[in-house]
Amino acid sequence: MFKNYFTISLRNLSKRKGYTVLNILGLTIGIACCLLIFQYVSYERSYDTFQKNSSQIVRIRLDEYKQGKLQWQSATSYPAFGPLMKKDYPEVQNYCRLIDDELLLSNDAKNVKFAEKKGYYADPSSVNMLGVQLTRGSASTALDAPDKMIISESMAKKYFGTDDVVGKTLIARNQNPFETFQITGVFKDYPSNSHLIIDYLVSYETLRKVLKANGDTEDSANTAIGWYDFYVYLQLSPGTDLQKFQAKMPAFAEKYINNRKGNKANNVKNELFIIPLSDIYLYSNYNQEAEVNGDGSSVNFMFLIAFVIMGIAWINYINLSTARSVERAKEVGVRKVLGAAKIQLIRQFMLENALLNLTAIILAAFAVYALTPAFNHLMGEQAAKGFSMSAKYWLLFSGIFISGTLLSGLYPAFVLSGYQPVAVLKGAFKNTSGGLMLRKGLIVLQFGISVVLIAGTIIVFQQVTFMRNQKLGVNINQTLVLDGVQSVTDSVYQDVLQPFKTDLLRNAGIKGMTVSTSVMGKEIYWTNGFQSIDHKELGGSTVYRIGVDHDFIPQFELKMLAGRNFSKDFKSDSKAAIINDRAIAQFGFKDPQDAIGKKISSRDTFTVIGVVQSFHHMGLQKPIDPQLITLVPNARRAYSIKLQTNDLQGTLANVKALWTKYFPNDPFNYYFLDDSFNSQYQSDQRFGEMFTLFAFLAILIACFGLIGLSAYNILQRTKEVGIRKILGASIKNVVFILSKDFLVLVIISFVIAAPVSWLVMHHWLQDFAYRITISWWVFGVAGLLAVAIALSTIGYQAIKAALVNPVKSLRSE
């Protein structure tokens, strides 16, 4: 019996090759898209799940309010929180603290090798809590004393050529005096799907030792509530209710932070939040994140699109199958007269459906295998060289595929098998109104989704273009930035810096040079609470501070709204400050001119000598913060060199030669400021590219269905076309009559989809501090494109039918 079903199925599918090809092509594209998106979602959601106890580990977030206004939200917090929470709450089994550490390391005292930026001072417990897998050394003792260090296998081979390095030493030449670390462990390269990049860890006791040597008598790294640059992780007992534990945070904040005398006097309030380890990458985008995190909204959006595309493909199948009902009605009638039971017909039609889907999934598997490298490159995922997806998503896909295959096959099977043989064989059968309404509803749904995707694509492109082309208020073009000097001690640094700058400016390809503690596109970690001496009633406010030399403002072409720049003619400028206009109201000043000469204080008191127009220090995803610029002529974090040359390679060679001459112990690392700044938009740009790609494919699949439906619609109206032409209808009239029903459905889909598009994209834009306003014409363009797509899809077959000889049309059966 099965062989008979199989043979009949093959005959039916081969009889209408065009119908079969459209269905298989649509299903293949839909399945391939679904698999590729699932792979992407699986990887993005896999961050930090490699750790054994990831479900029990949370990180603390710290928010600060002053005068009831939110000042900042930080991924870092106070180091005292770890020990205090373990003491106060029995559900806290353990804690670990990390604070980032940049080291200039060599494997002997004479030969500096590399500047390392991806490491932390860390508690001993961090090895187990953060899933650091030691291949050499003991986790219990690797970080239990000062001057101990563990490094990754790649880092070990980079310095020593082997990973058998336990007991060897590395020297940090940017420490004063030089610090020697003993390597006590080697760990497997830390997984890339983590919110942290860890190349090395230095014992937390080393930090305490360094601070003590520099005069810290309060053990700040252990007990500080005020120094909030530490990532604090807690390991909770199994089964701990996170919501209930979160509910304890306000009382903890009141006890240890908000009741402090200084906070009460300045009306400062802190709030604490916990975030599960596995949620950090996608749902934590606050100040001082360890790395650039992902975007949970974009991942969820793409996950939804996978379902949408598969849904459109199966909708096509249902539409095309039920549209053929008239054609297959006689087949059903004859088979019923010959004794076929309804269940037998259902099995027959379900087998045809299964063959189509099976063929599609095999073709999709080959397509995914071929396209995965290009897709991973588009997504920037370097970790997965081939197709890789977790078991959870394989099970989900299998469930969706099996369910979709069954559901998309059952309706046509029950419709076709339910025909009455007497009515069919008498020729009295025609499509039911219910079936027509279903197909029309599905067409409206398909093209409604298409309108949403078209409008979404336009808005995503507009937002990304807006961010890349928006005026920043600062000139970052043709700027070469060198990573600052680390090996030269403060006592001799100024004597070396000025000759280096003088020699550099003799180069014809260099227009200027400035040094600073931060550059555009790099997050400012230097914050202070300042208040105006004249408006103490306003209390203190957090400002983001940059230290610069005299050339920073003119070189980056910042606009002075009032006052002046720093000048070598004024020795008092060492206690002078320039603020941006965002800080004016915060300090209680009326306008830029009113701020000039006023004093503001934190630990030190500064006189405001200038106000600059606010500029975007970070990308347009983030708001402009109140900023304070102070004079630090010996800043060493970044050297910004303004270029004016076509001979870029020659200029770079000259810069490198001078660097080697003046700073022989520091590696020569550089980047171009505009490229670095624009990299902040990379994830949004990739999302836009991926959104556009899958939107196009979804619309293409919808068009396949429309081609098939219009073909069968026109086939059923062949005699009508012949009669109309005999009665004098023009080709234009015939094309209009054959197309109008579909176009009406597309217009209805636009009316429904336009407000949905606005709501969806308005929600997406809320993640950006600076965003476009959605214009009405976007939906007009989306609607016109949907109509144009439908018209071009239907038009060819309508014109083809209209050109047929009417005599031939009237002979048609």
Image (tube, rainbow, N blue to C red):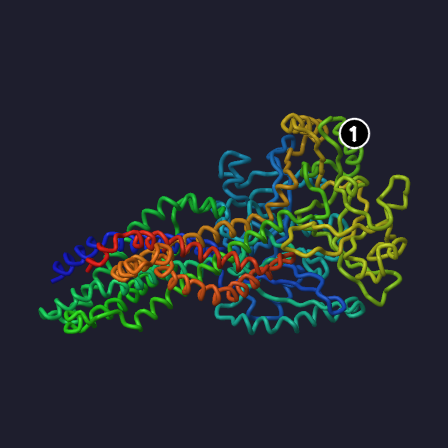
Name the foreground residue: 512 vs 199: 512
Looking at this view, is 540 or 79 the one in front?
540
Please tell me whether mark 1 sits on a helix, a strand or a loop: helix
Can you say whether 778 is above or below 374 in the image? below
State the image coordinates of residue 173 (x, y, percent, origin top left). Answer: 67, 37
**Residue in view at x 69 percent, y 67 percent:** 270
Which residue is disc 1 drawn over?
502
Residue 129 visible in the snapshot: no
Which residue is pictured at 44% across the width and 62% down the height? 449
Place of residue 599 in the rendered image (x, y in percent of width and height, measured from the top left): 88, 56
Question: Would residue 775 be found to the left or right of residue 589 on screen?
Answer: left
Please count the marks in the image: 1
Q: Quick check: 12 left or right of 783?
A: left
Looking at the image, the residue that sits furthest to the left is 338
The amino acid type, in three-letter code, at marker 1 is: Thr
Front-lying residue, 128 or 579 = 579
On the picture, is 31 further left or further right than 583? left
Given residues 726 and 706, the one toward you in this image is 726
Quadrant where the image shows the N terminus = bottom left
Find residue 806 and report its image quarter. bottom left
Q: Residue at x 75, y 59 (%)?
A: 542
Circle 1 packing at 10 Å, graded few (<14), some (14-19), many (20+), is few
Q: Quadrant of the C terminus?
A: bottom left
Give the percent coordinates (x, y) of residue 56.
51, 64
Residue 347 in view, yes or no? yes
Examine the rendered structure and indicate whether residue 670 appears above or below residue 285.
above
Of all residues, the one furthest to the front in this rendering is 728
Position of residue 97 measured from the top left corner of the image (x, y, whole percent): 61, 57
